[in-house]
Image (tube, helix red, strand yellow):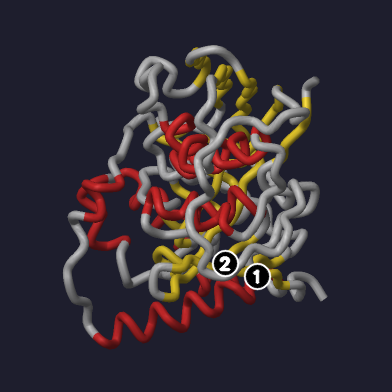
Amino acid sequence: MHGDRARLEGPGHGAARPHRGRAGAGRPRCRRARAGARVSFLITVPASTANLGSGFDALGMALGLYDEVEVRAADGLSIDVSGAGADAVPRDESHLVVRAVRAAGYTGGLGLTCRNSIPHARGLGSSAAAIVAGVAAGYALLGRELDTDALQIAAQFEGHADNAAASLFGGVVIAWSEGERFRAVRKDPHPDVRPTVLIPAQESSTKTTRGLLPAEVPHADAAFAAGRAALAVHALTTDPSLLLAATEDRLHQQYREPAWPDTVRVINDLRKLGVPAAVSGAGPTALVLGSVPPEVDVQGFDVRRLEVDTSGVRVRPLD
């Protein structure tokens, strides 16, 4: 059966293997690379899509679209960025990858070469990917394997673990929190789940779209969302024929429509034709779990057919 293997806070296939972390352990102590540790690594981290319909802040899936970060121990700090968002990111300690490296406990000199393919501010987890890359880089420079605290460090940046867990572990993830502790279960996707993303030129701020959400929703809509989110896990891992019903949402998308009306129009057009579609994360990208019929007008969207990434973040020594 597809998707019947679940791992609590575990790695994706091919990712750096974690050891068991102490439950509730705090942030790693700040330190420099230990003597004899490798000092140069290539970090490859996947994009992610979150919510997948009604699974708001709870469901995520890794996508076969990747950022790469070469990281090395160095004197001082140097940052080179190319690709998506290169003109908009800082080149100092406020760079998100650097902040995540520091949060992982590495305080030494640092050289970064970032090659970005994940579009920024489009609902494809670019921030979570940068954070996960930085955490993995910090661990690697310290000679440590990824452990259960890696998810805690990464998720604390955004306050929810759906995107971070997907980029860490790959596959389909179910994320939640217990007090201040973030948790995630990884599931294998069904091989027939083939995502397509429709990426508009428009950017979207997570803060702005969250601000459109009401403080309360009708009980009937909450109950509807619970059922659809549960069904989404089954559809993504076991029975993709249920994806159209599983991705129906009454919890958040209708409230955010003013932020990206063209995205909602395309999603509605697809769903009327029986094609599963939903907003990816905070938008404005549309996630399509199937092929886009030619009669659907996607002018103005960058259409990309992707695979589900099942490996999560990968760390390769360069020395």
User: Which residue lies at the image location 40% right of the left edge and 27% below the top edge?
Assistant: 95
- Quarter of the view holding residue 7: bottom right
Q: Residues within 10 Å of mark 1 (few under 14, many from 20)?
A: some
Would residue 261 be seen by someone viewing this image from the given angle?
Answer: no
Q: Is residue 315 above or below residue 9?
A: above
The amino acid pointed to by label 1 is Leu
Question: x%, y% of residue 171?
Answer: 67, 57
Q: Is residue 289 left or right of residue 107?
A: right
Q: Which mark is residue 23?
A: none
User: Which residue is denoted by mark 2 in the rendering?
Assistant: 184
Question: x%, y% of residue 26?
Answer: 48, 59
Q: Residues within 10 Å of mark 2 (few under 14, many from 20)?
A: many
* Front residue of 34 and 118: 34
Q: Which mark is residue 8?
A: 1
- Quarter of the view holding residue 115: top right
User: Whole-Å distance between the Cαs marked 2 and 1?
Assistant: 6 Å
Q: Is residue 97 above or below residue 318?
A: below
Question: x%, y% of residue 232?
Answer: 55, 72
Q: Quadrant of the N terminus?
A: bottom right
How many marks are shown on the rendered structure? 2
- Quarter of the view holding residue 160: bottom left
* Front residue of 293 and 3: 3
The amino acid pointed to by label 2 is Ala
Question: x%, y% of residue 138?
Answer: 58, 36
Are the two marked residues, 2 and 1, in contact with CB atoms closer than 8 angstroms?
Answer: yes
